[in-house]
Image: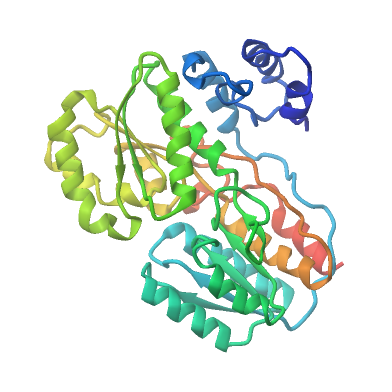
Amino acid sequence: MPDYDRAIGSRPGITCGDRTRLIRSWILRPWASITVFCLFTATPGSAVENTTVTVIQAQEIVSRATLEAVRWSGPESGPQALRGKSIALVAEDLRNGGIVGVAQGAREAAKAMGWTLKIFDGAGSAAGRAKAFSDALAAKPDGLILCGSDALENNAALILFANRDVPVVGWHVGARPGPIDGTPVAMNVTTDPLEVARLTAMAAVAQSNGHAGVVILTDSKYSIAMAKAKAMENVIRACRECTLLEVRDVAISESGEKMPEITKELLQRYGKRWTHTLAINDIYFDYSIASLTSAAIPSDGISLLSAGDGSASAFLRIQAKTYQTVTVAEPLNLHGWQVMDELNRLFAGQPVSGFVAPIHLVNADNIVFDGGKKFQYDPDNGYRDIYRHQWNP
């Protein structure tokens, strides 16, 4: 599979328009995957504001991201599972469906490896997080998974594990996949959050034929959330006839309390100008629907699009065509298997795989595929058998 940055970006004199034409020429090939957005490849010193996102570009990118049964592109080999390992998973908040999905996948993988997994819930608060770390450390695990909490903010706690030679991997613990510099996190397992965010915004451009009136919902508590919000904002600003109405900071942990009133306020402020909401997580929409319904907004009167994580409630809304039209769903169960595989590689003294799963947009047309009947995105690419074969040859 080609890497557009290497294939295009390394060529001298390549312009943004050249990149777009080359991507379009490749997009119909069966192995093509969009990993480059012309908007974000301006040369140093150039103004992003001078570039544009067109409806055709948005439609092409969305079309590629909605294909089902994407072929496995992760590791094909790895060390045999070392038996009897004990793993601690510190979860930011088990009310978050994304975190629950990863934990379920990790539990599946632990069973396949002959490992034990203990889950410690931070309950979305500083006090709860501190207790979860304390309890996890007291359990004397062989490995640690940090799930949904910012690694840099929790670095002091992570160092306590590192000082005991406990390897650490994470899920959604930083703004990029890979190791987190300055922390013990050897691998942050995630799809590329900026690609996820851009795709979500592109879907709004495509849906609206380039005339979206957008509110963005984010949580400034998390660097990954702010990075996603900024990426979405950049796409909307680059769409000439789209309007960015507002970027609203709402703590995920307070979404149940605040979103009903915020939704009413936004309806009063913007009225019909508000056509699309882009959120960094599906959970915001769980608490928006009642306000939309009580305001007599028809189910197709506003489009809710989420840049993660593909919760069961999001699948239900998309399937029922009730306000939410899109979620760029994380392969949560697969990620649970991957974090366990990364720990196994570290136990064996090998480098992490560094695998980054391709992004996937779920909408009403493809929701029945790849696990959608179970209200989740679970790629039908045989990843379980591939990992099992590596661990138990």
Q: How is the image coloured?
A: rainbow
Image height check: is 76 above or below 317? below
Whether residue 366 sits left or right of residue 379 in the image: it is left
72 and 252: which one is in front? 252
Question: For the C terminus, which image quadrant?
Answer: bottom right
Image height check: is 347 above or below 322? below
Percent across and percent down for residue 76 are 82, 52
Can see residue 92? yes
Q: Quadrant of residue 107?
A: bottom right
Question: For the N terminus, which image quadrant?
Answer: top right
Can see residue 31? no
Percent across and percent down for residue 147 are 53, 64
159 and 375: which one is in front? 159
Image height check: is 159 above or below 17? below
Whether residue 117 sits left or right of residue 167 in the image: it is left
- Residue at horizontal 32%, vertical 55%? 251
Percent across and percent down for residue 268 are 12, 34
- Residue at horizontal 36%, vertical 20%? 208
Q: Residue furthest front?
A: 45
Q: Residue furthest right?
A: 393
The image shows a total of numbered marks equal to 0
Percent across and percent down for residue 21 are 66, 11
Whether residue 31 sits left or right of residue 330 in the image: it is right
- Residue at horizontal 72%, vertical 81%? 85
